[in-house]
Amino acid sequence: MARSTLSPLSILLSAILLFSTHVFAASAVLGIDLGTEYIKAALVKPGIPLEIVLTKDSRRKEISAVTFKPASNGPKAGEYPERAYGSDAMALAPRFPGDVFPNLKPLLGLPADSAEVKEYALRHPALKVVAHKLRGTAAFKSAAAFAPEEEAWLVEELLAMELQSIRGNAAALAGPDTSVRSAVLTVPPFYTAEEKRATQLAAELAGFKVLSLISDGLAVGLNYATSRQFPNINEGGKPEHHMVFDMGAGSTKATVLKFQSRTVKDIGKFNKTVQEVSILGSGWDRTLGGDALNYLIVDDMITQFAESPKALKASVEAEKVKTHGRAIAKLTKEAERLRHVLSANQQSQASFEGLYDEVDFKYKISRADFEEKAASHAERVGAAIRDALTAANLEIKDLDSVILHGGASRTPFVQKELEKILGSADKIRTNVNSDEAAVFGAGFRAAELSPSFRVKEIRIFEGAAYPAGMKWTTDDGKPKQQRLWTAASHLGAPAKEVTFANREDFSVEFFQIVPGPVSGETVEAGTKTLTTKNLTASVAELAEKYKCEKSDIRLKVSVRLGTDNGEVAVTKATVECEAEAPEKEGIIDGVKNLFGFGKKDQQPIKDGETSDEAEASSTSTDSPTTKSTKTKSSSTSSTSSASASESADDKTAKKTQLVVIPIEFSLEKTGIPQLPKADHQGLKDRLKAFESSDNARRQREEALNQLESYTYKVRDIIDGEAFIGASTAEERENLANKNSEASDWLYGDGADATKEVLKARLKELRDIVAPIEKRIEEAKKRPEVIKGLKEALASTKTFVADMKKDIAKHEEFLASRAAASSSSSDASATESSSSSTTAAPSADDFDGLEDESATTTKVVAMEDLEKERGPVPPLYALDDLKESEELYVSISAWLEEKLAVQEKLGATDDPVLLVKELDDRRKKLDKAGMDLAMKSVRNFERKKAAEDDAKRSSTKAKKAKATKAKPAKPANTLKLKPGKDGQMPSQEELEAMIKEFQREQEESGGPPPPPPPPPKEEEIKHEEL
């Protein structure tokens, strides 16, 4: 078979893919701990292993909040307000409570009418919570930053803004040549499929490619395993069991993890040891966290404030305070601070000026009072632990340790409750970073999933957290349901094969069993729907083509839970049945058919019968027909052969085969309606427009700052001695007026001016100041530059004159030597013509064969050498000096002319002799000098090479002449002489001849002859005889 060749387009696409892979491999990855109150990120890139991304104010975590800062002149349609993030956003909460959106994580993927969303709206009364028109999930309308017609902002959009800010900080840390796109995000173990989808949507809107989601507890466990080695179960080791207790701002989670190592097959014949971290069970309380504790303090503040004498006098009611956005924002901010102070102190206090209706308020609280109010919350701490142990089928004594994570876990009464549940504090681990363990685990996971990095191999097994199953309707209309996974099932486990009896196209709905709106109740929440497309046609094909019974036809579907987000993935769908296998033609039959001999059981064609008639005759009867002239033995043989053939056919008919046909299907997400592509792109475009508005605003602010700082600069320099000396009174007066006008305008109408207007104002001032500053700078630098140029001109003039003098001297010497050589040639010719004999060669002819290193020790003076050989040849010709000479003439004339004009100008006039022009001409002179220097080097090298070539040629000629003068000595040859009997010499005579020849060679200094040949076998035998 011919080898297929790749087209040029295929090669090009392959090369693009290869190089693009390397480009992506060089990109950085990010691990993001998406908390309720704080967001933390860890960057991994070549050269930066797991480094925390700092905020703009150099903090290691960013407050999860975004603020729309309303414009001073009110919102306008099509315009976007200024945004603030983190601590800057929370600082604006008392001023703009209706446009500050904190702690949005608990609202992801939840309907607007859910209990969690209602509680959030109650705690943030200034925020306008609405239901999204398509999805029905929570969205927010801006109070004053946008026009009323602006669409509500989804929770996913607001969270995407915060993630964009994190990504910008990470890009600043990674450097300008590195892109930050890939990320792994942490999520609580209780997140449903809808909540995970909402998290992924927010990350995608922020420009991230989500490599995977990882639960908080598993991320902490992964970070815990990076620096430890656990027992090898293949060597009899016992796995370790640890619990991660994570109490953050929004919820409390407990995760039981199993740590162990295992020996697995490596490349080739080698084995390797890998670490394994598995989730055995999880428990949680979705509403128990730092925020719930803060609200205890807020409620107590409101109660005491309403009961204070000043508030009673002003008729302040507690319910009105709870619905006042600014008052609640102030109280919530202080409650957070008070709770942190009480973790280290016994009491704390806060004061508010004009908290509500211009009434001041002072508040005091002790740790004992706080713990008394939180008694009911303390009882809920143990519920998450008990649920996790029950799910893992373990007891407290089976745990090796409890790892604490989350800020609220450091609360004193929480740790007391943990000690009470665990029996002692011995199992509580305090050597784990309770703030950053999860983000480091997420960063490690991101590096593991990225092809750019090679990390320690740690295999993780995420838990499903919720039971899941499927339901469908049979062909006869009966509903069916089957549970496929439990809460302890691991994501990414081998696919399960499910068999269906349906033979017509139908749909299968996959669902999760999640908590319902009523406490203690569960509901089946749909996640995906599988719909077959060609099942009916495939069943018909099996029945008609392969004769399958419909009762024997089965549909088999392979399903699994994805490792990245835990959603159902269908890996394969086929319909199959067992059918009779067709008769396979043997090799011998195939060869016979190829050459026209037919099969073994075919009858020969009779005389006068065509092949078609013979075929029809053979197929019309079951038993073969034979002629009557055949013998009995031949009839018997034919009958036995036919019987064997029939038995073989029966045996072949019993063979079956499995016929499999792939089924086409679609797998669509169900539950909360998904955004259409147009709406999804619309969200991206709105975020991009917001970002473009932020960039334009930053550029305008830069222009504003530049103009403001320049007005201050003008005030400082206008009264300076140098500025006064280089400017006229009219110029200074004009500048002062323009600067004062710009300063007044800047703090008036210019506060809202565009970037272009601000830059125009700045240019107007610079056009006045720049010429005066140029005069000052020129007057300061000009004398020194002129001095340097004059020195360079003088050096060039002297150098050119010296070179011309040397060239003239050398030309004069060459002329005189040529004249002397001509007269000596005439005298030699006369002498040679008068002589008729030839002189014998003298010994001087062989002087050139002596060693070149042999020199005389006679010292010759330089003056005598110059008289004998003439002056040193110059390195330049007159043409080489032409450029430098012309430059000298032109620059000298230009400088003389400009100096004459410049000397007539005053200090307030614009100079005509500029430093830049002087520097340019100095550079031209320097370049010409450098070119001359390089030319001299090249001329010297060429001359030296020519002399060396001439010397080598002369030496070779002399050696050739000397060799020719000596007669060549004839080479010795070995002469073979006949023996005494007239025959060829014997062995002894031949050896004697060779020895004589060797002696002659040694005497003459020639090469030794070859050794004599060994005696022949017959001669040896003859001598032995």
Image (cartoon, rainbow, N blue to C red):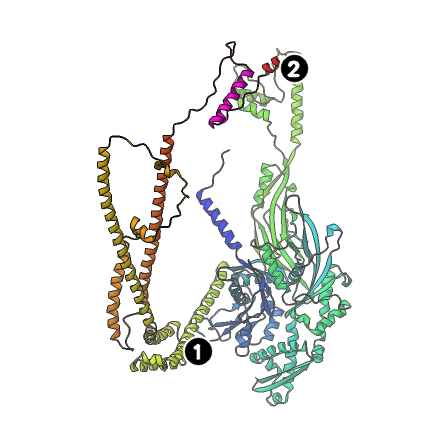
Magenta region:
982-1011
Upstream in sequence: badge 1 or badge 2: 1
Read off the residue under disc 1.
Answer: 73
Picture coordinates of residue 45, whole percent (x, y)? 55, 59
Residue 95 image position (x, y, % from top left): 53, 79
Q: Residue at x 47, y 67 (%)?
A: 691
Classify the position of the C terminus by image quarter.
top right
Q: Amino acid at mark 1?
A: Asn
> Is 271 situated left or right of 663 in this image?
right
Label 2 Cα neighbours within 10 Å, binned few <14 / some 14-19 / many ≥20: some
Where residue 523 sits: x, y (%)?
Answer: 66, 61
Residue 233 spot, x, y in % from top left: 73, 52
Instruction: Assess whether residue 992 is covered by the magenta stretch.
Output: yes
How would you classify the magenta stretch by its main secondary structure? helix
Identified at 59% across, 24% down, the residue is 588
Q: Secondary structure at mark 2?
A: helix
Residues at discs 1 and 2 in contact (Cβ within 8 Å) = no
Residue tagged 2: 635
The residue that appears at 45% across and 46% down in the rendered structure is 12
The CA span between labels 1 and 2 is 117 Å
Secondary structure found at label 1: loop
Is 881 in front, or is 123? 881
